[in-house]
Every structure is written in structure tokens, then in C-alpha cells.
Image (cartoon, rainbow, N blue to C red):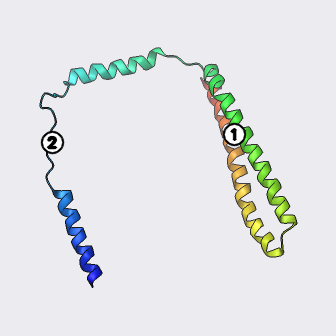
């Protein structure tokens, strides 16, 4: 009962703190820009994007090395984990082998995700490069 009273008191105090008025010391010299100023600023932003044409080959030159490094790292990790799990499976008791088979599901799923992502990326790149 005493615990309930403490919780109620703390809740009431929290609500009072949240609802307490807050003074603002913001400068009164600030004014919002007019609609025409906002529109011209937005059009300037859009025009900056139209002037920078980036080709597909430039994008592939930037992202392809990073993607290859990440894929290589993922393959090395997958091979390493597979080797470790294989060694554990060979020396495991039947109960431990059952647990390792459950962990193997996670390994297979991660391999499918990694190589599936590479496949989807390659497919999307080929489709969009032929369209554009």
C-alpha cells in the first residue's frame, strides 16, 4: 500500500513538472520569411539538384569497390563461422549437435540474405542501367 502511494505521488509530481509554464527568452526580432522568400529559396534548392548530372558509371565507380569489400568481408565471415560450426559439430555430443543444427539455420539465413542482397542489387542495377 505504501508503494502505491509513492507511485501516485511521484506521478502527480511528474505531471506538475510537465505542465509547469516555461518562460521563453527568445529574441523578439525574429520574423518568419514571406511566402515568396520561401518559394524562391525552395526553387533555388531544386535548381542546384538539376545542374548536377551524375552518370551511372560515376556512381558505379564510387560504390562498386565498397560493395566488393563488404561482400568479401561477409564471405570470409561466413566461411569462418561455417568452419567453426563444422568442427564443433564433429566433436559434439548428440545434444550439442542438435543445438548446433538450430544455429545452422541462422547461418543459412544470413548467407541467403547476403547473397540475395547482392543478387537483387545486381538485378536492379542491370534493369535500371538499361532503362536509363
On screen, residue 82 above or below 65: below
Q: Where is residue 46 in the image (x, y as percent from the top left)?
A: 39, 21
Q: Which of marks 2 and 1 is in front?
A: 2
Give the residue displayed 76% in from the left and 44% down from the top. 75
On screen, residue 113 above or below 100: above
In the current view of this chain or complex, which residue is farthest to the bottom? 1
Give the residue displayed 72% in from the left and 44% down from the top. 74
Q: Position of residue 43 (x, y in %)?
A: 33, 20
User: Crowding at label 2, few (<14), some or many (≥20) Cα neighbours within 10 Å?
Assistant: few
In this view of the protein, can residue 126 be seen by the observer?
Answer: no
Residue 118 numbered tag: 1
Q: Quadrant of the C terminus?
A: top right
On screen, residue 14 above or below 78: below
Query: Can you tell which quarter of the image residue 11 is in?
Result: bottom left
Residue 15 numbered tag: none
Disc 1 is placed on an element classified as helix
Query: Can you tell which quarter of the image residue 27 is in?
Result: top left
Quick check: 37 left or right of 24?
right
Q: Which of 13 and 74 is in front in this view?
A: 13
Query: Can you tell which quarter of the image residue 67 is in?
Result: top right
Q: Earlier in the sequence, mark 2 or mark 1?
A: 2
The residue that disc 2 covers is 24
Amino acid at each position: 500500500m505504501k508503494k502505491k502511494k509513492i507511485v501516485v505521488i511521484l506521478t502527480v509530481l511528474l505531471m506538475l513538472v510537465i505542465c509547469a509554464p516555461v518562460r521563453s527568452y527568445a529574441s523578439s526580432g525574429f520574423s518568419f520569411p514571406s511566402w515568396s522568400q520561401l518559394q524562391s529559396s525552395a526553387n533555388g534548392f531544386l535548381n542546384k539538384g538539376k545542374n548536377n548530372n551524375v552518370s551511372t558509371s560515376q556512381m558505379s565507380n564510387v560504390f562498386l569497390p565498397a560493395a566488393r569489400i563488404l561482400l568479401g568481408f561477409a564471405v570470409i565471415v561466413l566461411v569462418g563461422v561455417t568452419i567453426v560450426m563444422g568442427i564443433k559439430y564433429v566433436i559434439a555430443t548428440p545434444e550439442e549437435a542438435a543445438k548446433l543444427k538450430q544455429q545452422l539455420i541462422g547461418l543459412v539465413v544470413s548467407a541467403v540474405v547476403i547473397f540475395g542482397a547482392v543478387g537483387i542489387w545486381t538485378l536492379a542495377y542491370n534493369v535500371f542501367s538499361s532503362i536509363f
